[in-house]
Image: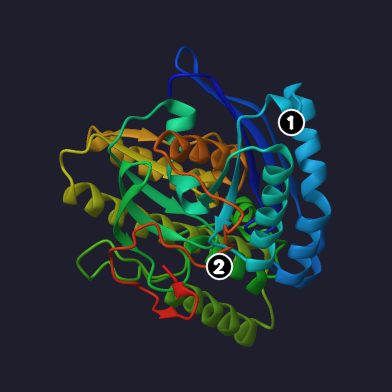
Amino acid sequence: MIKTLTFLGIESSCDDTAAAIVRNSSSQGPEILSSVVDGQTAIHAAFGGVVPELAARAHAERIDHCIEKALSKAHLSFADLDAIAVTAGPGLIGGVLSGVMCAKGLSAALGLPLIGVNHLAGHALTPRLTDGLAFPYIMLLVSGGHCQFLYVEQADLFTRLGASIDDAPGEAFDKIAKILGLAQPGGPEVERVAQSGDPKRFALPRPLLDRAGCDMSFSGLKTAVLRLRNSLVTTQGGLTLQDRADICAGFQAAVTDVLAEKSRRALALLPNVTNFAVAGGVAANGPIRAALKELCDRKTVGFLAPPLALCTDNAAMIAWAGLERYALGYRDDLTLSARPRWPLDVTSPALLGSGKKGAKA
């Protein structure tokens, strides 16, 4: 990248409406000038999870306000922008469509280049935004909707080393919270309650550790927790606060063990890679981050995790991924489509099957 470039990023793939301004120059490198995230936790709280229709409506109502706020915080106007990057998938189609249509309108009105970004690439490239991490590296992308190991060779070249064959860990955290009557989003709540729990009280499974490779599974672990809860309710008439804490601690420990062991195997596949990064909402979990860092320390491999605010969905990562794609010559036009499914590695067979919309993962 020869000259200074300033990008607007727009993100609306799930339940966070976000806009950000990121600038990159050959002299100073990348800089996040502003990052605005308008969450929808209150909207979905009564339903125990994200309601796609409500999320889409909220995005449509909030995107323009987030963009205005991002520009204001950066002390910039539309005239200062060089291009617009927007999440074009994967995600809840209504939300993705809201962002894509907004970005198209701005691109057409302002005459600015448009770059559609894969949401997963945004997460996978975040260590380059925050730490200037050089290619190649191994990325564990672990969030509410995705869990996969990626060999990141370039901004447009990703090889999947392994992935969850069913639930993503973040989804499992949310469902465990719902099973136990805890608040949403479930990840932070399960982690909070687990602090006072005994992770060894209940024997919970570590799925697929007896199978070679880096693929993972969390559906059976979730079912084991559900059966445990039902058993306790039947035998003692309900759950105590300590029961909840011990279940949360045991579940969190099981997820941590699986992610740590599968990370060890991913590193073993590429022994010459010297850096391991983690991103996505579940990367904000303290015990999981600590276990992965300990693994990397033992292997004398560099460990990188974004600041907590950049682990969850945000538009700064989308703006940066757009900058990276722009530098490689990518441009989109007004035919850009919103995609509910969009695997980063298009050469590996789909783990979760395919349909009319394409490969799921």
Residue 83 in the image: state x and y as whole percent. Answer: 60, 35
Foreground of the two, 259 or 272: 272
206 w.r.t. 122: above or below: below
Q: Nearer the viewer, mark 1 or mark 2?
A: 1
Quadrant location of residue 161? bottom left
Q: Secondary structure at mark 1?
A: helix
Q: Which residue is mark 2?
A: 340
Question: How far separated are the C-alphas under marks 1 and 2?
Answer: 29 Å
Residue at the image point whose x is 27% and y is 38% from the top: 136
Residue 40 visible? The answer is: yes
Q: Based on the displayed image, in which of its 4 quarters is residue 340 positioned?
A: bottom right
| Residue closest to the eye, 39 or 125 | 125
Rendered view: 181 above or below 33: below
Residue name at image x 54 percent, y 34 percent: 307
Residue type indicated by callout 1? Phe
- Sequence-earlier tag: 1 or 2: 1
Q: Amino acid at mark 2?
A: Pro
User: Which labelled disc corresponds to residue 78?
Assistant: 1
Instruction: Give the side of residue 346 with respect to residue 308, left or right.
Output: left
Position of the N terminus, as image quadrant, is top left
Q: Residue at x 38, y 45 (%)?
A: 291
